[in-house]
Image: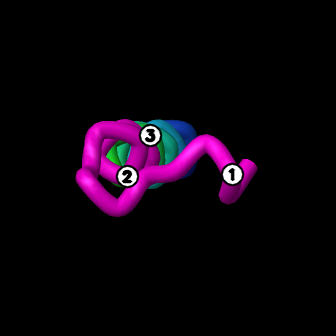
Amino acid sequence: MREQYYQYKYEKNKARVIDWLHSENFKIDEL
């Protein structure tokens, strides 16, 4: 059960990061 929870959090964070990378606000300078 715990592994599923962390997997869920990981997938959610990964999706958020990908959304951020694809967002118009993303700038290479921010890295």
Residue 4, position as x, y percentages in the image: 42, 40
Q: Name the one closer to the observer, 11 or 18.
A: 18
Residue 24, position as x, y percentages in the image: 25, 53
- The reply to whether residue 22 is in sight is yes
Which residue has dot 3 on it?
14
Q: Are marks 3 and 2 in contact (CB under 8 Å)?
A: no
- Label 3 vs 2, first from the N-terminus: 3
Residue 1 numbered tag: none
Q: CA distance from mark 3 to mark 2?
A: 10 Å
Q: Name the one closer to the observer, 29 or 9.
A: 29
Side of 23 relative to 21 (left or right): left
- Name the dominant secondary structure of the magenta segment: helix
Which residue has dot 2 on it?
20
Q: CA distance from mark 1 to mark 2?
A: 14 Å
Q: Residue at x 74, y 49 (%)?
A: 31
Range drawn in magenta: 17-31
Q: Residue at x 41, y 41 (%)?
A: 21
Residue 29 numbered tag: 1
Residue 28, position as x, y percentages in the image: 61, 42
Up the image or down, 7 lies above or below 13; here it is above
The amino acid type found where label 2 is placed reads Trp
- Label 3 vs 1, first from the N-terminus: 3
| Crowd rating for badge 1 (residues with CA inside 10 Å; few <14, some 14–19, many 20+) | few
Q: Name the one closer to the observer, 5 or 17.
A: 17
